[in-house]
Amino acid sequence: MTQTVWAQLVGQEPAIEVLSAAAESAAALVSGSPTDSGAMTHAWLLTGPPGSGRSVAARTFAAALQCTSGTGCGDCTGCRTALSGTHADVRLVVPEGLSISVAEMRALVQAAARKPTTGQWQVVIIEDADRLTEGAANALLKAVEEPPDRTVFLLCAPSDHPEDIIVTIRSRCRLVSLRTPPRAAIAQVLIERDGIEPELAEWAASVCGGHIGRARRLATDPSARERRAAVLRIPLGLRRAGDVFACADDLIKTAEADATEESKAKDEAEQEAVRTAMGAGGSGKGVAAAKRAADAAVRQLEKRQKSRATRTQRDTLDLALVDLAGFYRDVLVTASRSGATLMHPDRAEDSARAAAEWSPTSTLRRLEAVLACREAIVWNVKPRIAVEAMVTTLRQG
């Protein structure tokens, strides 16, 4: 028997309760049946830490709204197409660059004003809504203030803080907060859904920081495990002054290689698709004009791809910095003997050695340097400069 769409959400029972009630209310509204009208609203803000499943929750809710049975059965055409991203009335905005532009948002709002074509609702999912520019946020605000009939906006962001979502949009959305999934739940999903060996699944769940996607990648990709190991060798490997630049260079190169590996196949396929759509490779009258148009379209695509590669590189680097911050946090936990769960339990010996060598004050300075590096990169400081400054502090304490 097919599982319901809610099985996609791992360890999020409180959120499932709220969203499933809203989906049932939405189905009753469509059919004209009596319902708790307060359960459903036109705008939702889904927040939670990285890896908690914000975008998964949004897609799952969209599938439940489009479900022909109104329960999120997971088996009907509405559920399957919404989850796979092919439903005509579910529009997904995933920023490929560093931000979501006002032009992109205006076009989306205009499209969202149309009536549903095949489904029950017109659903707009905005992943990383914290990347909206000021103009894009204002364009979205107008639509949220005066929502079209049968249109639902689902915004995903790390938090409802004004730095992530402007207050005026936040005040018009219903908040659903996701939590960090329990390790046991993550391990169970890896074992049952991905066929991972129990021992490897439990290890990946214990070191992923509650990030389900990261756990899956660590469990299935040996190179991802090696990159993590290389990052966690840095704190105790900074012995000489020259190590500062070597470690900084390794961090940057790893992030660049990851971005290149992830983008290359996608970039080539997109370029080929654009050339084909523009008539490149044809013969006969108009071939020269078609080739010029195709080349121009590819140049525009390459600009977007370059922006996407920059974002991928920064996201990869940020993941490495999160691992580093987790190590220094473990050192403080070990030194204080608080008994709190370690972020990197497989590196307990290293964190104990560091706790014996460093004072809590110097460890805290190192942790602050990692967090400052993350913030600097958000503010568009050149990654290499930010990382070299951080690693210098990591060595000096």
Image: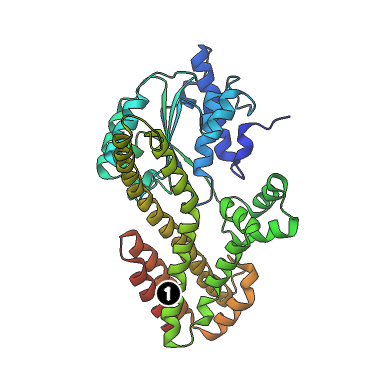
Give the residue at x 40% y 54%: 309
Query: Which of the image's four quarters has the C terminus?
Result: bottom left
- The local crowd at label 1, few if under 14, some if 14 to 19, many if 20 or more residues have their Cα within 10 Å, is many
Q: Position of residue 24 (x, y in %)?
A: 56, 23
Q: Residue at x 55, y 29 (%)?
A: 81
Residue 338 position by quadrant = bottom right
Query: Residue at label 1?
Result: 248
> In the rendered image of this protein, does residue 359 appear above or below residue 301?
below
Taking the image as shown, residue 141 lies to the left or right of residue 190, namely left
Does residue 171 appear to the left or right of 233 in the view shown? left
Q: Residue furthest top?
A: 32
Q: Give the mark count.
A: 1
Q: Residue furthest front?
A: 284
Residue flagged by tag 1: what amino acid is it? Ala
Instruction: Estimate the x, y position of residue 82 in percent, counting from the top left.
Output: 53, 30
Location of the N terminus by quadrant is top right
Kindly tell me whether residue 132 is visible in this rendering.
no
The answer to whether any part of residue 383 appears in the image is: yes
Secondary structure found at label 1:
helix
Q: Position of residue 43 (x, y in %)?
A: 40, 31
Identity of the residue drawn at 39% across and 39% down: 275
